[in-house]
Structures are given as C-alpha cells and as structure tokens.
Amino acid sequence: MAYFLSCDWGTSSFRLRLVKAESAEIVAVRKSDKGIATTFNQLAENILNNPEARLLFYLRIIKEAVSEIEKEVNILLDEVPLVISGMASSSIGMAELPYRSLPFSIDGQDIETALFKASVRFTHPVLLISGVRSEVDVMRGEETQLIGLATESTAARGEGLYIFPGTHSKHIEVKDRQVTYFKTYMTGEFFELLSKQSILKAGVEPAGDDLENLGCLESFKEGVLHGRSHNLLHAAFRARTNALFDKLTRKENHQYLSGLLIGTELKDIRTSDASHVYVCSDASLRWRYETALDVLGLKEKVHVFPDGWADKAVVRGQLKIYKQFTHTT
C-alpha cells in the first residue's frame, strides 16, 4: 500500500488527506465546512431510513474531494483504501457504529470498526472507525488522535492526561497504556453561544489573534484566573459589566470571556494525579491553552505539541488502526 486516504469528518468540518502509507506524510488536503451535521440535514426522508442509500450519499461527497485531489497530484486513486474517523460513525453519520466501552488500549487494537468493500459506485475500500464511551460520556475522533499521538510521538510517554481543545474539549487519562477515564468540556460551544447569542454579544468583538495586544493578553489572563476561582454563572456576567462600565474594550472583553471559559475547563487539572499533561490542538487554540496553563502554574508538567501535530495525530492514528485491522483479518 503506497497511499491511503484519511478522512476526519467532524460535526462542523470535513477534511480529506492523501497520505503516504510508509511515512505518514500528507501529500494533499481538501477541507470544507460540509460537516456531518450539515450533511445530515441535507438527507431526504427516503434516504434517511435506507442504510445503503444513506452510505452512498455521504460517500459521494468524499468522492468529489478525491477527484479534486487526483487532479492536483495527477495520480489515479482507484482502490486506494479510505479510513474515516470522527462523527461519520455517529447517529447522524453515514453508518452508526456502537461505541467501544472503556478501557481501551492506545495501540488501537480494540477500537470498534466496520469495513465497507469497494464497489463500482465507490472504488475504495472504507474502514470506518467508531468512538468510545464511558458510563456518562462519549467521544468520536479524539480516540484516533490519541492513538496517533501516544504511540507515534517521542514526546508522549503513553502515560498521563491528554487534552484535545475544541468545541467539545476532551481530557483523556491514560494509565498502563489504557484509556481509563475521560471528560468532555463544552468550552468552545459555550463560548460560541455566549459571545454570539447571549446578552454578552453586544460587549465583545473578536479580532483574530489579538492576544498579541497587551491589553487583550492581560484581559485573557484575568479571565483564566476568574475561571479557576469564581462561579462561572456569576463571572460570565462580568463580561456584561466590563462593557457597561467601560472597564475593558470590546476586544479585551472578548478575550476575558475566552479566558474565563478556558480557565474553568482547566481548573480540574489541579486535582488530577497525572504526572504529565499533553496538549494537542490546532494553531488557533494552542497559544491560548499554553498561556492559560502558565497562568495556572501548571506549565512545568505540560508538553504542548507544535502546530500541525493535531493533523499528524489523526493520520498516524488512522494508519495504526488500519494496520491493526488488516493484520487481524
């Protein structure tokens, strides 16, 4: 196998990559906002309840992206295997798969998967990866990132607390190379709701990477400290009075609210018995979490992966799971 196609299909985003199988080098990428939620909402009633038609509907979207990559790299990709992780295996995805229950091994050998053989209508064999559940929590996609991160990176020792920031941030505990516990924090979704749909929206104004501005940076840090020590429901209203009393500019207030929610999320780490903490995210969140961990006095035991490692972890995790699957079948 010279190449494989890596698809990371989340609730709000779609990513397809052409990857060299031997080195896990990403050759080409296609990204869009055609996430699983948007795609599911486009399903007609007669397709929704027809498993075969529903699967093909989703695969046609992938096929369009594959065709674009073929034109870019000038390589015919028929029969190249496709590995999919994320929300594609959920109740709103192409085919719902059962969750794997805790614990599970970080070498990828016991993750739930399903194989769909290549056909005339879709010429790639498809390995669909499911998610993981505890008694009170679920995740789809982060387990694949974790497998790629913990088993392929020399920085990660396989033990500790792994943090994957995002719309629904995940904190995953690994002991004896097994995932034993994890928590979901709705940090990104709460920020979106508060800053765009609540009474606070009039007092905040996003401005990209404005943490480079000293006032914005200090406001973010203040928010982090308040998130650690204050009641969130009360502290969130400060973003209202900050604006009313002209204590902060709208841009600074935006950063205060961001810091408040991230600080609320990260305060749980103080009670964790993990000797090492690993943070892996895209560039837009990496600096925020690194700064917040420094403010909370936790930076010494934290390793923050560089930009680009979030994508690498997905690809390496998918490749690891695919090799485990083909080895046992």
Image: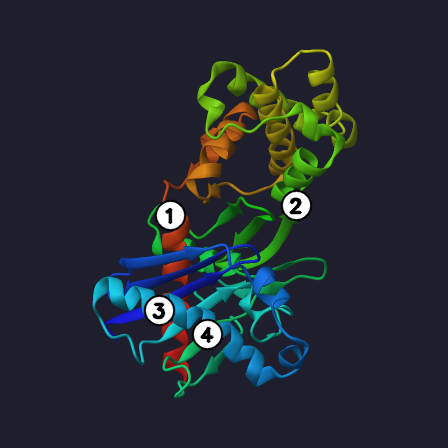
**Which mark is in front, 1 or 4?**
4
Q: How far apart are marks 3 and 2 (CA)?
A: 33 Å
Look at mark 3 in the image and give the residue it sits on.
66
- Lower position in the chain sequence, tag 2 or tag 1: 2
Give the x, y percent position of residue 128. Answer: 49, 73
Q: Is residue 306 above or below residue 327?
A: above
**Which mark is in front, 1 or 3?**
3
Give the x, y percent position of residue 81. Answer: 35, 76
Label 3 with label 2: CB-CB less than 8 Å = no
Give the x, y percent position of residue 100. Answer: 59, 69
Identify the element where label 3 is drawn: helix
Q: Distance between the residues labelled 3 and 4?
A: 10 Å
Instruction: Name the residue furthest right.
Output: 234
Q: Residue at x 29, y 59 (%)?
A: 28
Q: Which mark is residue 60?
A: 4
Figure quadrant of the C terminus: bottom left
Label 1 with label 3: CB-CB less than 8 Å = no
Q: Which residue is drawn at 42% across and 58% down?
A: 314
Look at mark 1 in the image and give the residue it sits on.
309
Identify the element where label 2 is drawn: loop
Look at mark 2 in the image and give the residue it sits on.
186
Identify the element where label 4 is drawn: helix
- Lower position in the chain sequence, tag 3 or tag 4: 4
Q: Residue at x 41, y 81 (%)?
A: 122
